[in-house]
Amino acid sequence: MIETPEARLKRMKMRSWRRGTKEMDLVLGPWADAHLDGLSAAELEEYEVLLAENDQDLMSFIFEQAQPAPLIAPLLAKITTFARDRLRKV
């Protein structure tokens, strides 16, 4: 069965909010809600790759303790900036 674009976005948003660690839920969930609908097909593919990453690895990338794969680095930088800006408002 082929996944519709709407079903794909719904699945990706759910996966963003239900990562396995609350920290990554709070980083990826709000970003997905705010930006996923506006991503290009290529950016959605990059986000799929990012979603496949381990939460601990993603956190080390966000805290600049390790370097992400070049494919997801630009998107992860946008997500990191969004999360930091959100925390500054609180």
Image (cartoon, grey):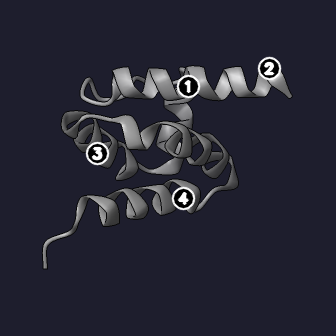
Going from N to C along the chain, the mark reached first, 3 or 4, is 4
Reading the image, the residue beneath label 3 is 49
User: Is 22 on the left or on the right of 77, as rendered?
Assistant: right
Going from N to C along the chain, the mark reached first, 3 or 2, is 3
Q: In which quarter of the image is the N terminus?
A: bottom left
Q: Are marks 3 and 4 in contact (CB under 8 Å)?
A: no
Which residue is drawn at the image coordinates 77% and 27% (left, top)? 87
User: Is 71 on the left or on the right of 13, as rendered?
Assistant: left
Residue neighbourhood size for the residue with mark 1, other residues' Cα within 10 Å, grouped as few (<14), some (14–19), many (≥20): some
Reading the image, the residue beneath label 1 is 80
Q: Which amino acid does label 1 sit on?
A: Thr
Q: Is residue 64 above or below residue 56?
A: above
Going from N to C along the chain, the mark reached first, 2 or 4, is 4
Q: What residue type is labelled 2?
A: Arg
List x then y, in percent, for residue 23: 68, 47
Distance Cα–Cα, label 2 vs label 1: 12 Å
Q: What element carries label 3?
A: helix
Reading the image, the residue beneath label 2 is 88
List x then y, in percent, for residue 15: 47, 60
Distance Cα–Cα, label 3 vs label 2: 28 Å
Going from N to C along the chain, the mark reached first, 1 or 3, is 3
Residue neighbourhood size for the residue with mark 3, other residues' Cα within 10 Å, grouped as few (<14), some (14–19), many (≥20): few
List x then y, in percent, for residue 33: 54, 46
Residue 70, quarter of picture: top left
